[in-house]
Amino acid sequence: MDLADKYLFPTYKRSHVVLVRGEGCRVWDEDGKEYLDFVAGIAVCALGHSSPVVSSALEDQSRKLVHVSNLYYTKPQAELAQLLVENSFADRVFFCNSGAEANEAAIKLARRYCREKYGPGRHTIITMKGSFHGRTMATLSATGQAKIQAGYDPLLEGFKFVPFNDLEGLKEAVDDSVCAVMLEPIQGEGGVVCPRPGYLQGVKDLCLQKGLLLIFDEVQTGMGRTGKLFAHENFGVTPHIMSLAKALGNGLPIGAMLSVEELSSAFGPGSHATTFGGTPLVTAAAKAVVASLLNGGWLAHCSRMGDYFRSELEKLKANHPVIKEIRGLGLMVGVELEEPGAPVVEGCLERGFLINCAQEKVLRFVPPLVVGKKEIDGLIHALDEVLK
Ligand SMILES: Cc1ncc(COP(=O)(O)O)c(C=O)c1O
């Protein structure tokens, strides 16, 4: 902790633990204290820590080929793309290294496609207030939260913000400069905010009517988190473009931007690139992750555990008026409190539970999808004590 505090930029407010090991839903600190992890690297380690699925894919691939340039073909990258395409609305995939980069690629593709199709002037992307799309200049400019943008002016031009869940507001914001609408199907950093019934369909209908591209940022909601491989499947609405990252590599840094075929010509040779994106090592691991999510029964398990978790939280709410609302889908769960959540996060940490707080008053739970009832019961018990 002293070394980190001395040598690292102080960009993170860290909890006072040094984590040294993880297995399944558990992590251990350097004193051997065990924690049940309901953060999972913020919705990253879906298959749990030290997943044997990932370890063996990594071990195997690391002995064959770790990295070559994207100037050459590699098998794991092509096979992962095939797996994603065959299990989604999409036809094409671009691999990168993070969620922000996946959104950068989405923004660039939308702008370039519309430029080629309609000529200059149609470049604005409408995004949502309370959204989070990343920390690069383009993605923080696209993010509808002043605190994320503070101090970084001038921001990138060409983003307009409307309230999430407000179809009328969106309709009013569309003008001749708009090329796309970008949103998270469920807002994550915004405090686990779910779409109202019919909202996403309404957004899609408007996009089709006005000739706009629909971009879903599924960086947090994707890869099984909501009980479907992608959150939009719960609502029966497909986008033209989708960004993924987080759980795609179960902790290995990988992002992906997927789109329908029609857009692929806008990303021709030389239009976009990355050194590390889609490296054989990471795509081999991600391929094993996606195959395991699809074939291991984890999506159905996630739905069951999510329902159980939320029903137990509802019981807790009956005894704790400080709980205002319980939200979420699958194992993406938010508990809005009447008061700041930081002391609750601290109390849970003392009792051996890692949880997280979004937007000051929303406790956020995004555990590994392999979490069981016993672990959930343990957390509910700890929350009961802390809230008392
Ligand atoms: C919805 C969403 N988009 C984008 C990002 C940015 O991803 P990364 O931190 O991998 O750049 C996040 C990260 O929390 C996210 O939740």
Image (spheres, rainbow, N blue to C red):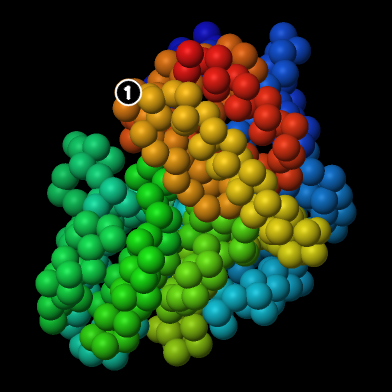
Depth check: give the residue in front, 95 or 383: 383
> Neighbour class for label 1 at 10 Å: few (<14), some, many (≥20)?
some
Percent x, y of residue 149: 23, 43
Percent x, y of residue 122: 19, 79
Depth check: give the residue in front, 50 or 95: 50
> Height in image: 313 above or below 58?
above
**Left or right: 306 as drawn, with respect to 324:** right
Which of the 4 quarters of the picture holds residue 284?
A: bottom right
Mark 1 residue's CB less than 8 Å from ligand 1: no
> Height in image: 162 above or below 137?
below
Identify the residue at horizontal 48%, vertical 64% (top origin).
Answer: 243
Percent x, y of residue 292: 78, 59
**Left or right: 27 as drawn, with respect to 243:** right
Identify the residue at horizontal 80%, vertical 58% (top origin).
Answer: 296
Percent x, y of residue 17: 59, 15
Q: Residue furthest front?
A: 318
> Height in image: 190 above or below 266?
above
Does residue 14 appear anywhere in the picture?
A: no
Please, what secondary structure does the residue beneath circle 1 have? loop
Which of the 4 quarters of the picture holds residue 49?
A: top right
Depth check: give the residue in front, 303 or 103: 303
Does residue 334 appear anywhere in the picture?
A: yes
Q: Quadrant of the N terminus?
A: top right
Residue under numbered circle 1:
339
**Amino acid type of the residue tagged 1 in the rendering:** Glu
**Left or right: 9 as drawn, with respect to 27:** left
Identify the residue at horizontal 82%, vertical 51% (top origin).
Answer: 53
Q: How many marks?
A: 1
Which of the 4 quarters of the picture holds residue 151?
A: top left
Identify the residue at horizontal 52%, vertical 9% (top origin).
Answer: 2
Depth check: give the residue in front, 5 or 233: 233
